Image (tube, coloured by chain):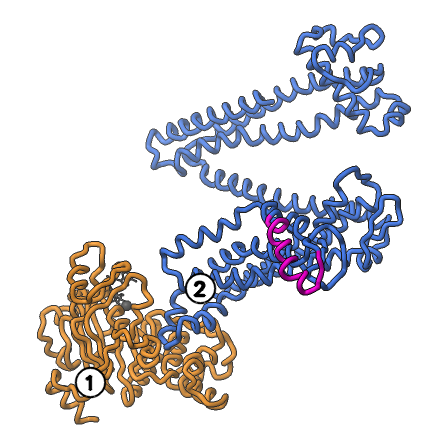
Chain colours: A blue, B orange
Amino acid sequence: MLSILTAIVVLGGLGFFLGRQRAIASAGGDARILHSLPVYYGTNVALLTVVPAVLVLGVWLIVQPMVIAGAAIDLIPEQGVTQAGSRDLVMSDVRRLADGINTGVERGAFTAAEAASLDTATTDIRAVLADVGVALGTDVEPAILAAAQRSRQMSDTASTWMQVIVLGLAVAGLTYAWLRTNKDLRARNTVERAILGLLITASTLAILTTVGIVLSMVWESANFFQLYRWQDFFFGLEWRPSFEGGSELGLIPLLWGTIYISLIALLVAVPIGLFAAIYMAEYASRRVRSVAKPLIEVLAGIPTIVYGLFALITVGPLLRDYFAAPLGLGTSSSSVMTAGIVMGIMLIPFVSSLSDDIINAVPQSLRDGSYGLGATQSETVKQVVLPAALPGIVGAILLAASRAIGETMIVVLGAGAAARLDLNPFEAMTTVTVKIVGQLTGDTDFSSPEALVAFALGLTLFAITLCLNIFALVIVRKYREQYE
Amino acid sequence: MKDLNEMSQTDQESAVDVLKMQARGVDVFYGAGGRTGSAAGMAADLAADKNVTHAIKGVDVDIADKTVTAFIGPSGCGKSTFLRVLNRMNDTIEGCRVTGKVTLEGEDIYDPNVDPVQLRAKVGMVFQKPNPFPKSIFDNVAYGPRIHGLSSNKADLADIVERSLRRAAIWNEVKDRLDAPGTGLSGGQQQRLCIARAVATSPEVLLMDEPCSSLDPIATAQVEELIDDLRSRYSVVIVTHSMQQAARVSQKTAFFHLGNLVEFGDTDKIFTNPSDPRTESYITGRIG
Ligand SMILES: Nc1ncnc2c1ncn2[C@@H]1O[C@H](COP(=O)(O)OP(=O)(O)OP(=O)(O)O)[C@@H](O)[C@H]1O
Ligand SMILES: [Mg+2]
């Protein structure tokens, strides 16, 4: 595998030099006659050598195991499959055994010829393999052994063929491209197209991953909604999962907790972050700025679990002892308020550094215009700079909001894990994300609604943050148009 | 009025009775950092520093009331810089230091007791590049009057806005879309909007930095008409690269070269009989 890749790369390197050389030679040594710079000719040959070969290699590596598995499974009687539970389980046994035999050959438990003629009746394969350090789960059945042997054999042949074909392709590509190289070949344009292709592939991959994530969520959520009425999920006011059945899985208390905590977090983060940004961008001298800005941004580097500890150890008890208890609002040290405030602190650098950039992007000429009319600094900020930056700032706030909604650690440690529908901010509550974690940790049976609900929750969360992000993007885009 | 002008033309240095602003020994340095200290010592100190740009060197200028003064000179000679000295807009530039004495009606504008904000309400400015606020056309013009509380009610404000837009020769183009954003206008329209915005605050002195550089001949003529009209009540200082424009609209002309004020005097005299050879070369197109 690795050697074949190395071979391809070496061929590519060779192609590069050969291509460049031939191009220069075709121009009689005068590079100015060439259509493109010599590097482009080299790259062109290298690309034609490497790209088709690697593509075929990739496809081969994906298809080969599928084909082999299909052939091997035929050797196992129907009853064997049902006994093991599923095809996947059987195949994993087969694969493990095949790998084990290969390792055995490598480590000298038996020769290659012996390995090919192994028999369950005469050899205790499990014991022999255990001696060389390969552990098998059960004793080897004849059918499994047969399947494993066939898959070994097939992959041997397949690997040989793969090497021949892939290397042949690389050499063919090299030769073809090298022969085509002459001074009029538009190598630069070809390379340009290859780069375009690379960029398109990258963005396609990004999009496909998103689509894949969404589809898997949708699939599992659909399973959930077959087991649980969607009306009860979306409008249920109670969250009481129990693995003995009869759970109540209402979204509302979790959603309420999420919104409540995020709201408090934003109430903390937006004013402080925004005012800090205004100070940094408009008032602070360069020296203050160069010290204070990194300091604020240090906050962004703190892992959220550390914020969670801060909430648990410091803020929670503090709020309980000095606010909640004297006011008679509760005696819980985990509360919406605790999580909200600490999460707000976490979001301050997020809001402030985004807003700072946006405020700095407001052209100086607008400020000059305002000062030139006799406006003070704060009038200028309030009436010219902020309105001009507003859409961008709203975008920053929405991005902060979607982070708040997705936050888990601070909530677990700050607000607890009890789902509750309450207005009292000093009461423990919890959020969607915490419950997703809660439903999936420990022993879970992925066919029960109690576990599958996590996917429905995740999908809901995803939908909410997606809407927020789209909204933010639309606003930010509008803002860009203003100066262009 | 006419008499005073006549007098100033025959004896420029003694026309002090209508003096509006006066600059004496003004130096401007860019890149001076956070240096402080006594003005006199510092000027010499800064002038010796190689890292500091000495943009204006010992300039004396008198801006007479109800007069148009033109600043001319090659690009980079310090016209805009000196213009910004007159309303302390240089204060907003980091590392820019101004030394010397500038007075407005006898009062030193660089005195620590003077509020630059108050000063800029009296000495308005139109910038070299149009810079309308991203607000509606109406709000752009109403900005100054609102800040300074110049209108007693809505109708009054609307009146000020309309008058200013008319004076800047843009009313007919925008009267049907006062709610449209000012940034959506064409470059020339934006510049006239900025002129309207500056006029709306009724400054006593209006500084205009190349106000016509993005205007077509018709709009230029209208702005020149406006300048002429403003002269009846205010002082106007205009920076221009057009000799014809300077000759047409101004009564006084100052010629700057490499940060020095080479010649300052009546426009007629500068354009017909300059006393400095550099002035003559510039206006005949040989330097610059
Ligand atoms: N913000 C600044 N920082 C540093 N140097 C500056 C700054 N503004 C102007 N200068 C320098 O001061 C000198 C005078 O510039 P100024 O803008 O006053 O020229 P100008 O006469 O208005 O030119 P133009 O006709 O091209 O507008 C130039 O050498 C310029 O490089
Ligand atoms: Mg200028």
Question: What chain does mark 1 sit on?
Answer: B
Q: Can you tell which mark lies on residue B19?
A: 1
Across and down, in percent, residue B22 comes to: 20, 79
Residue at 15 percent across and 90 percent down: it is B6
What amino acid does circle 1 point to? Leu
Q: Quadrant of residue A321?
A: bottom right
Horizontal and vertical percent position of residue A332:
70, 55
Left or right, A341 with respect to A238, comes to left
Magenta highlight range: A310-331
Looking at the picture, does residue A273 appear above or below residue A105? below
Q: What's the residue at 58%, 61% (across, down)?
A: A268
Residue toward you, B145 or B188: B145
Residues packed near mark 2 inside 10 Å, few (<14), some (14 to 19) or many (20 plus): some
The residue tagged 2 is A362
| Residue B278, quarter of the rendered image | bottom left
- Badge 1 marks a residue whose secondary structure is strand
